[in-house]
Image: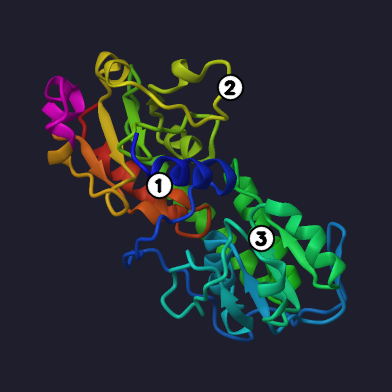
Amino acid sequence: MSGRTPRLLAATLAVAALALGACAEKTSTDTTAPAAGSSPAATFPVSVGELTLEKRPEKIVSLSPSATEMLFAIGAGKQVTAVDDQSNYPAEAPKSDLSGFQPNAEAIAAKAPDLVVLANDTNKIVSQLTTLKIPVLLSPAATTLDDTYRQLTDLGALTGHPGEAADVTKRMKDDIAKLVKDLPQRSEKLSYYHELGPELYTATSKTFIGSLYALAGLENIADASDADGKNGGYPQLSQEVIVKADPDFVFLADTKCCQQTPETVKARSGWAGVSALKNNQVVVLDDDIASRWGPRVVDQVRAIVDAVAKVPA
């Protein structure tokens, strides 16, 4: 197993596979915020759960690439003063050397934030920052699209952009509904394998990633391998299991981190006879988009739907 495996697993299980060091590519989804003045002015104080902000935050630190994308999408980008070292989208995000994997309270406090957004509570960082009187919003990895919409709504409320957050959420819902409604009805479901890394780690239907494929009516070959859920929805499959399952599609979410391509997959022992390879249905994904739960989820759904739509019913 390669040296990347612990890092990949930590990313997948702790923060839903935060980007593994690759730069995001430009995509077609419009995640820019509506023009200023398109919604009523927000009023403070505002509360989300146990967190209450007395005034609009102007020094936000985001230690989650998904949260970073959400903040910029809802028009709060100018309030963001620092993001973690994996937040590479949008390009104007103020990237720093702060880590979301191993957050350091002292380094975060040095940014003098009036709001910190985190995806996980590694090293009990939430209590450390709370002790320093720094407001913290914990937005864990989504498991459903509703989680994404809820986090957008929460960030909209806390940053003073509730109307813009509602607009982004509505646009996402509308776009996804439009993408999936025209898919042909099939008597038998098409199957797929989603690859997180060349070590053959994958995601089951119980995960956020898997839920997007379910929207397109696809059947996940990993579900049977993780029936007891002991791998948290992210099992490692064997070559034999994948080849025997003979998926109709292979979706590669390790093209930038690990340089996987349809050609490298075809060169693997025994894979040439898999239906996805024989029918040229190995789909190259953007690692970052495939691993985050922000507004660009629409692009991930589009990539799935486009692939499925090419197969005759």
Q: Residue at the spot x=33%, y=17% of the render?
A: 188
Q: x%, y% of residue 158? A: 75, 71
In the rendered structure, does residue 302 fall within the stretch colored magenta?
Answer: no
Part of the protein shown in magenta: 265-279
Up the image or down, 302 lies above or below 246; here it is below
Identify the residue at horizontal 33%, vertical 54% (top origin): 286
Amino acid, disc 2: Lys
Q: Nearer the viewer, mark 2 or mark 1?
A: 2
Looking at the rendered structure, the secondary structure element under dot 2 is loop
Q: Which residue is mark 3?
A: 118
State whether the magenta stretch is mostly helix, strand or loop.
helix
Disc 1 crowd rating (10 Å Cα; few below 14, some 14-19, many 20+) is: many
Q: Indicate the amino acid at tag 1.
A: Val
The image shows residue 209 at horizontal and vertical percentages of 47, 40
- Of 113 and 174, nearer the camera is 113
For this view, does 112 lie left or right of residue 200?
right
Do residues under tags 3 and 2 come within 8 Å of each other at their CB atoms? no
As drawn, is 78 to the left or to the right of 44? left
Quarter of the figure that contains the N terminus = top left
Front disc: 3 or 1: 3
Q: Which residue is mark 1?
A: 301
Instruction: Report the colour scheme.
Output: rainbow
Residue 184 position within the rendered picture, expressed as x and y whole percent measured from the top left: 32, 32
- Name the amino acid type tagged 3: Leu
The residue identified by callout 2 is 230
